[in-house]
Amino acid sequence: MSDRGVPGAHQKTLFGHPPGLTVLFMTQMWAEFSYFGLQALLVYYMTQHLGFSQARSSLIYGAYGAAAFFSPFFGGIVADRWLGRTRSVVIGGLLMMLGHFAMAFEALLFPALALVAIGNGLFMPPLAVQVGDLYADDDPRQAQAFSAYYMGINLGGLLAPLVCGTLGELYGWHWGFGAAGIGMLAGVVIYLRFRHLLPKDPQTRSQTLPGARVAFTALDWSNARLLIAIIAVVVMFRIGYEQSGNVIALWVEHQTDRGIDLLGTHLEIPATWFQSINPLLIIVLTPFLMRYWAKHAERHGPANLLSRMSLGCLVASLSMLVMVAAAALNARTGQPVGAGWVTAYFVLLTIGELLVIPVGLTLVGALSPVQVAAMAMGGWYIAKFLGSLLAGAMGAYWGVIPATAFFGIGAGSVMLAAAFLYVLGRMRPIRLG
């Protein structure tokens, strides 16, 4: 990609980045607030309000998550070929908003989830591509931009369980889903209001000469093969990671002692609040990691990004080994275990995530041919699609196989991903400024 003459591209914000990054940060933050607001409530809503079994709820949860992150591949094609990036983001956001509001009606559960999944597919790829388009190819800030953008994603994820989860649990499920819809509306309004600060849309393929084909160089094909390999490996990371909102949510509800004594009063922490630990840690840790990586690059040169992803998978696998130990303690005593176990799980999982997901987004943005950038970004989300699908299928066996074995399988999958990424990094080191 190159400097496209973005309005304000060379101005500085408080954080030393183009003002458009703040716009994309806020847009994505509210979109994630809506998405994670629904996610925080979904399993509880199905099991407690609709009376679905745990196995059926896990399968629906996994299928919905899979659809929401398979659709970006097709949404990216639609954005590249027909709609363009701006219209794709706006239409996708409006569809998600309607889906969240439709969750207020029990009979519309499946149509509502479908609207959110389709809207997510149109919304996410072009928005993420615009982050990279704010910078010229040789701009060293590009690698940091995706970490900052990912922090915005998780700010929404932090607020969602606290706001939507609390409204849903204390005042009624539909209040929580309604708050999620309002959040999505806020994201669309911000995006449209400050659209002038964002990159101009390139021509879609439908606007080029009839019969024109996209020309790829040998390097483009080499990069495409590497991206496919990375996506395939990240699926194994996702199999373990995606249990955090599914089986881990059930573990917190049933196998975790959530009671605290405060000023002589015994209180119980709402189960949905634990889903805020992960995004809170991302918000706290991201600035420190960005500063550390910048100093490391000054002293030792750019790091091998694939090796960084490998380390992240290794750390994430340790989080699941913590849950193996917690499950063994629970099986031995027959009593709920302390909240410290699941807190330690989220700490290690978050550190691993920060070394995997933002780095993967950076690689997609750097290696994708501009003609199919949104489609390539949608391809990145296929890893989440397959991981969610497999994690949902695996979640159906929760309670059937011992919890120690369940968490052990997740740990093994993520360790295998670490090994493959390490080998890829040795075969073709990728170093960006």
Image: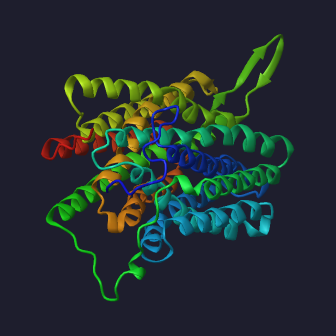
- Tell me what residue is drawn at x 26 percent, y 41 percent: 432
Left or right of residue 194: residue 44: right
Residue 202 image position (x, y, % from top left): 41, 67
| Quarter containing the N terminus | bottom left
Residue 347 image position (x, y, % from top left): 49, 27
| Quarter containing the C terminus | top left
- Tell me what residue is drawn at x 51 percent, y 38 percent: 151
Q: Nearer the viewer, residue 315 or 142?
A: 142
As drawn, the residue found furthest toward the bottom would be 210
As drawn, the residue found furthest toward the top would be 264
Res. 155 visible in picture: yes
Quarter occupied by residue 387: bottom left
Left or right of residue 113: residue 228: left
Q: Nearer the viewer, residue 308 or 142?
A: 142
Residue 250 image position (x, y, % from top left): 63, 42
- Tell me what residue is drawn at x 33 percent, y 63 percent: 370
Res. 402 visible in picture: no
Q: Nearer the viewer, residue 392 or 171?
A: 171
